Image: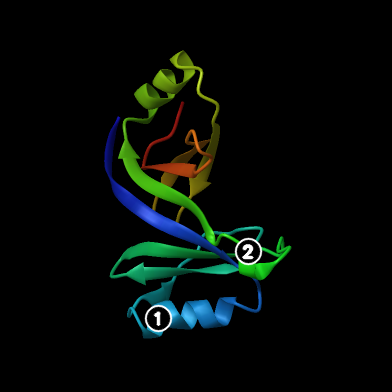
Amino acid sequence: MAVAGINHINIEVSAGQLPKVKAFYEDVLGLKLGFRAISKRDGAWLYAQDTPVIHLSVTEDWMNESDKIHFNHVAFACNGLAQFKRDLDIQQVQYTLEQRSLADREMTQIFLYDPVGIKIELNFAGETLS
């Protein structure tokens, strides 16, 4: 597997924060609202040209908004799905795998956590397991 670069970052916000945060990334950084995959949660994907670089996800799991860490995960664009999955299995790394249908292609995602608990999303665009 070779990591090709960061695919996007995900920021968790409350429903009340979503319009303000979305406006910041649109107005201040010039990102554009675009296509968003179907999700159980509300949110928005903000694009730099044709790439969705900021994913905003609404969550109501807020005990104290001032203490909430908004950063949810880092995602990488990857290739070599089959070999990478074999390597994870050999190393006995726990992960979840999801198949997704995007507007123009299929994609497989692998989710895992680093040793300090940061969620990692690996996106294998155009790759599926048979």
Q: CA distance from mark 1 to mark 2?
A: 25 Å
Q: Residue at x 43, y 50 (%)?
A: 74
Q: Nearer the viewer, residue 123 or 128?
A: 123
> Residue 19 is drawn in which quadrant?
bottom right
Q: Residue 26 at what x, y percent from top left?
A: 40, 81
Residue 56 vs 127, above or below: the answer is below
- Taking the view exactly as shown, the residue that stands out farthest to the front is 67
Residue under the image location 32 percent in, 40 percent down: 78
Residue 75, above or below 82: below
Q: Which mark is residue 26?
A: 1
Residue 68 at x, y percent in the picture: 61, 62
- Left or right? Give the position of 12 relative to 80: right
- At numbered mark 2, what does the secondary structure look like: helix, strand or loop? helix
Q: Nearer the viewer, residue 127 or 41?
A: 41
Residue type at mark 2?
A: Asp
Q: Amino acid at mark 1?
A: Glu
Identified at 45% across, 14% down, the residue is 90
Left or right of residue 125, residue 73 in this image: right
Tell me the residue that label 2 is attached to.
Answer: 67
Tag 1's secondary structure? helix
> In the orientation shown, which residue stands out farthest toward the top?
90
Which residue shows up at 52% across the image and 40% down it? 99
